[in-house]
Image (cartoon, rainbow, N blue to C red):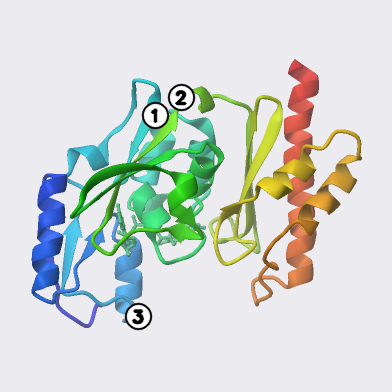
Amino acid sequence: MISYDFEYYLPSSIKEAVHLFEELNGKGKEPIYFSGGTEIITLGRLNTVKTGAVIDIKQIPECRIFDLQQEYLVTGAANTLTNIEEVNLFPLLSKTVSEIADRTARNKITAGGNICGQIFYREAVLPFLLTDSLMVIAGSKGIKTVSIKEVFNQRLLLERDELLVQVKTNQSYLNLPFASIKKRRQWNTGYPLITVAALKVNGLIRIAISGLTAYPFRSPQMEERLNERGPSLNQRIDQAVHELKVPPLDDSEGSFRYRMFVLKNTLHDVLSQLEGEEQNHG
Ligand SMILES: Cc1cc2nc3c(=O)[nH]c(=O)nc-3n(C[C@H](O)[C@H](O)[C@H](O)COP(=O)(O)OP(=O)(O)OC[C@H]3O[C@@H](n4cnc5c(N)ncnc54)[C@H](O)[C@@H]3O)c2cc1C
C-alpha cells in the first residue's frame, strides 16, 4: 500500500500534459509523469518516491506510437516492453527488452519509464545508445529533438518539467547484425549482473553495457580497442577492459573481481558471435 494520497491525471495531448505539470507544480503538488507505474508504485510503497499528483502519459498518441515513419523507427515512450517485443521492428531492441523482468511486469513496464527511471539498470536504453538515436523531449519551452549523445550521460538529463515523448532510430540500423547477452546472478528474471548489447555497423562492433557500473554506458574507447586488427581476441578484450573509466560495482550481487570475470567472458561471447558472423557472410 502507498501511505499517501495523490491525484491522478490522464491528459490526451503533450500540450495538456506539460500544462498540467506547470499548474500542479505551481500548486506545490510536486507532480511526476507516470508511464507503466511499476517503479513509482514500488518506490512509493517504500516512501522513496513522494508526489501529490501523477500525470499518466499513456493516452497521448505521440507517446503510444511504435512505427516506421520516413527514415526512422519511432518508439513512443509509453510503449510497453511486451508490445515492442511482439511487434518486433528492431530485433536488437526486442531481444534486449525481452530479458527485462518477467512477462507480467513487461506488460506494464514502458520503454520511457525504463529509460527515465531511478533504478539504474535502464537496459532499454542500450540499443538506442548503439544507434545514436534521437530523443524527442517536451517541456514548458516546447518540443526538442536531441541526439542521445547529448542528453544521456549516466541517465537521461531532463529538466523536472520535461517529458520523454519518443525515441527516433534511423532505419539503417534496424537489421544490422547484433548480440545482446544478459548474465544474471540467479534465476531467469532478475536484474542483470551484466548485460552487453552490441551492434555491428560498417564492419565495426559497438557495445553498450548495463549492470557493470551504477549506470548504463557506451564507451568509444572500449570499442576502439575491441575493433583493433592484429591482437588476438583475448588481448583486445584485456585492452578494452583497461579503458573502463569507472571501476565495476563491488557489492553483494557480485564482487569487483567476479564482475570483471563475467565481463570478459561476455565480451568474448559477443565478439565471437559477431566476428563469426563476419566469417560466415564476409
Ligand atoms: C519484477 C521487476 C524486475 C525488473 N527487472 C529489470 C531488469 O532486469 N532490468 C531493467 O532495466 N529493468 C528492470 N525492471 C524495471 C525497472 O526497474 C523500472 O521499474 C521500470 O522500468 C519502470 O518503468 P515504468 O514504465 O513502470 O515507469 P514508471 O514507474 O511509470 O516511471 C519510472 C520513473 O520514470 C519517470 N518517467 C516515466 N516515463 C517518463 C517519461 N516518458 N518522461 C519522463 N519521465 C518519465 C517517472 O516519473 C518515474 O520517476 C524490473 C521491474 C520489475 C517490476
Of pointers 1 and 2, the one earlier in the residue sequence: 1
**Residue at disc 2, secondary structure:** helix
The residue carrying mark 3 is 46
Q: Would you say 63 lies left or right of 275 here? A: left
**Residue at disc 1, secondary structure:** strand
Q: Position of residue 145 (x, y in %)?
A: 33, 41
Front-most of 97 and 27? 27
The residue carrying mark 2 is 171
Looking at mark 2, is its residue's CB closer than 8 Å to ligand 1?
no
Of pointers 1 and 3, the one earlier in the residue sequence: 3
Local packing at callout 1 (Cα closer than 10 Å; few below 14, some 14-19, many 20+) is many
Q: Nearer the viewer, mark 2 or mark 3?
A: 2
Q: Would you say 228 lies left or right of 101 here? A: right
**Residue at disc 3, secondary structure:** loop
Local packing at callout 2 (Cα closer than 10 Å; few below 14, some 14-19, many 20+) is some
| Residue under the point 20% across and 52% down | 141
Spatial CA span between label 2 and label 3? 41 Å
Amino acid type of disc 3? Leu
Q: Are marks 1 and 2 in contact (CB under 8 Å)?
A: yes
Q: Quadrant of ligand 1?
A: bottom left
Whether residue 269 is visible, yes or no, is no
Amino acid type of disc 1? Leu
Q: Quadrant of the N terminus?
A: bottom left
Q: Are marks 1 and 3 in contact (CB under 8 Å)?
A: no
Q: Is residue 183 above or below residue 61?
A: below
Amino acid type of disc 2? Gln
Q: Nearer the viewer, mark 1 or mark 3?
A: 1
The residue carrying mark 1 is 73
